[in-house]
Image (cartoon, grey):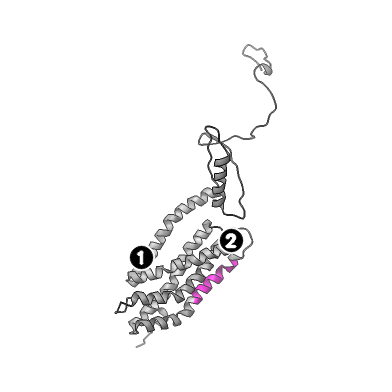
């Protein structure tokens, strides 16, 4: 190495030269060095894997002073999405309730229709368990989509019950006749929606790991909410409205609207 005086200084006098293994690249984030350790999780849920890994690392690994560990990647995205869902879901249910209350002008009937949401949750959760799917972001999106479809069945039933009562029919007869006459529309509505998602449920190509949980949740929720709506909702309507003598306000039913030509 040339010195300012022009003399040449051997490199061995300035540094110790040897061959050793070291990082091929030094990465930094927020002015701090970082090392990324990646892993692919298969055949189990991501949240459970991270929880178990954290426990084992805390028990078996002692990090040197100044070192710390963070979990990122898909797990970080999942946690961020779940936080958003914790805000979106209550807002969605509240919005549905307000729309139902504005349409039926009855808190009892709005709550009665909202009860279809737990009915749908039962089928959606069972579908995840039977299909051995994990509760992922796509499955959560499926639950939100399921809320609207499940409520639709209740709207069809309750609006027709109210229509029959406005025509002068007593409560018990309106519930029985309405349940029979609205059996086909409710089954067709749920059946068409479920059939449209069957290709997603049996998909095998790229992206199927996202499509399958969503389809399973919606199909399972539709089955449970439809069956429970046909059998339980009429009974609950009869109980809720037994003390109500005047016929409640209802949305007009397009199927029962009569046209008069003059």
In the rendered structure, which disc, 1 or 2, sits on the residue that comes first in sequence? Answer: 1
Whole-percent x, y for residue 200 in the image: 58, 65
Q: Quadrant of residue 244?
A: bottom left
Report the front residue among 175 and 15.
175
Distance between the Cα atoms at labels 1 and 2?
36 Å
- Disc 2 target residue: 132
**Residue drawn at (54%, 70%), measured in percent from left and top?**
194
**Furthest residue toward right:** 19
Q: Nearer the viewer, mark 1 or mark 2?
A: 2
Q: Position of residue 255 (x, y in %)?
A: 42, 81
Magenta region includes residue 195: yes
Side of 8 where 97 appears, left or right: left
Q: Going by the image, does 118 lie left or right of 17?
A: left
In the picture shown, does residue 30 fall above or below 217? above
Please tell me the numbered disc located at residue 67. Answer: none
Q: Secondary structure at mark 2?
A: loop
Query: Split into 4 quadrants, where in the image is the N terminus?
Result: top right
The stretch in magenta equals: 187-199
Q: Secondary structure at mark 1?
A: helix
Q: Residue, x 48% and y 53% (percent of image)?
A: 81
Residue 59's spot in the image, x, y percent? 56, 41
Residue, x 61% and y 51% (percent of image)?
A: 41
Q: Nearer the viewer, residue 110 or 228?
A: 228
Residue 180 visible to an observer of this rendering: yes
- In this figure, which residue is indicated by the disc labeled 1? 98
């Amino acid at each position: 190495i040339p010195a300012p005086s022009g003399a040449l200084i051997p490199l061995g006098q300035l540094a110790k030269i040897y061959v050793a293994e070291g990082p091929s690249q030094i990465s930094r984030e927020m002015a701090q060095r970082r090392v990324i350790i990646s892993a692919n999780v298969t055949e189990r849920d991501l949240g459970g894997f991270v929880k178990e890994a954290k426990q084992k690392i805390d028990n078996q690994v002692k990090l040197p002073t100044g070192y710390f560990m963070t979990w990122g990647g898909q797990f970080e995205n999942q946690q961020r999405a779940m936080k958003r869902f914790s805000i979106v879901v209550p807002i969605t249910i509240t919005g549905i309730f307000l729309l139902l209350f504005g349409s039926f002008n009855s808190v009892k009937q709005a709550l009665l229709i909202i009860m279809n949401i737990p009915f749908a949750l039962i089928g959606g959760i069972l579908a995840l368990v039977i299909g051995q799917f994990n509760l992922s972001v796509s499955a959560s999106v499926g639950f939100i989509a399921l809320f609207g479809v499940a409520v639709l069945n209740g709207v069809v039933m309750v609006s027709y019950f109210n229509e029959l009562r406005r025509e002068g029919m007593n409560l018990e007869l309106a519930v029985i006749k309405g349940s029979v006459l609205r059996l086909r529309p409710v089954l067709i509505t749920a059946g068409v929606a479920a059939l449209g998602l069957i290709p997603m449920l049996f998909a095998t190509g790229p992206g199927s790991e996202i499509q399958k949980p969503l389809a399973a949740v919606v199909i399972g929720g539709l089955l449970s909410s439809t069956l429970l709506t046909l059998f339980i909702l009429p009974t609950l309507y009869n109980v809720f409205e037994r003390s109500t003598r005047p016929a409640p306000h209802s949305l007009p039913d397009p199927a029962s609207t009569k046209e008069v030509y003059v």
